[in-house]
Amino acid sequence: MKPVFFIAITSAFFLDCRKETGFNEPPGLPFEVTPVTTAVIPGTIDEASGISDSKKNTGFLWVHEDSGNSPELFLLSYNGAVLKKIYLQNATNRDWEDIVLGAGPQPGEDYVYIAETGDNSAVSTDYLLYRFAEPAASVDTVFNYDKIFFQYPDGAHDVEAILVDNITRDIFMVTKQDSLSKIYKLPYPQSTTSTNLAVAAGVMKIGGVASASLSPDGKEILVKTYTNVYYWERNPGETIESALHRTPLSLGYVLEPQGEALCFRNDNSGFYTLSEKPFFAASVTLNLYKRR
């Protein structure tokens, strides 16, 4: 989503007005409340809207930018340097809003899912997910990918967060601009030849969701708004949608200018956030919240 405002970190008034209420931050949080920050080389990634820890390229993260940018992925090192860009041949970036790695059609293969689901004005008639096997760092261009077109059962929505269940291979989308975010599901197998109809899967107890991530073992979920990071520990046998219906735990989070990207680290030792760059800053930082 293109910036329409920036969150001033020093603005207590803004924080008080935007922060959701009713979610306490008790002692014993599972993650540190202050991140380890690493500067991202200025001018390399200025409009990050999605991030996911690479499984094939250890020590690197997949990052993409949103609308108005090229259909390409960045391989961003944990140390803040961009190794390279990988281009999606003949793809478009109308408004890429999230990226996850998850299971797909071929067992044992890790797939990249890119959510072409941003819709600030809620005017689109259909939406798209790109899906392809995770490339190695030696790849320059992705030529082969699935296109999963879909519609919502109740009209247009702006979605900036997706999740993939690695057991069922269902895909979940979470809306952003509803006062309480709605959950939609694309059950597996998703058609790549016709438009899929998403299934309504409930409503969350928070709104303004900008990103989401499932832990490597599938037992935890993180969801990010502009002002908070929320956490769920899934009960044994609990579905993703059932977990997201419950009241989450609000984690400690240092406010970013316009933080839209979130992911667990693959070794499950913490989670990353990454913000878009505001006009008043020279660069952004990659933020690691370590597990306690």
Image (cartoon, rainbow, N blue to C red):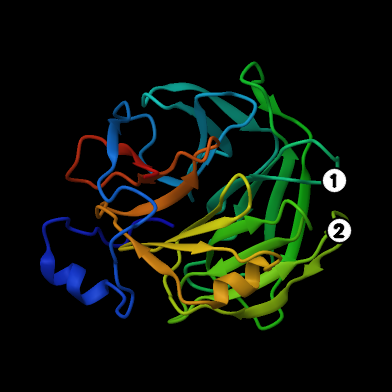
Q: Which sits in the foreground, 269 or 254?
A: 269
**Residue appearing at x 20%, y 68% in the figure:** 15
Q: Amino acid at mark 2?
A: Pro
Q: Is residue 284 above or below residue 139?
A: below
**Residue appearing at x 56%, y 68% in the figure:** 174
Measure how far apart labels 1 and 2 are at the Cα level: 8 Å
**Which residue position holds label 2?**
189
Q: Which of the image's four quarters has the N terminus? A: bottom left
Q: Are there few (<14), some (14-19), or many (20+) residues within 10 Å of tag 1? A: some
**Which residue position holds label 1?**
105
Q: Is residue 176 above or below residue 59?
A: below
Circle 1/circle 2 CB separation < 8 Å: yes
**Residue appearing at x 18%, y 69% in the figure:** 14
- Tag 2, which secondary structure? loop
The image quarter containing residue 46 is top left
Q: Which sits in the foreground, 206 or 281?
A: 206
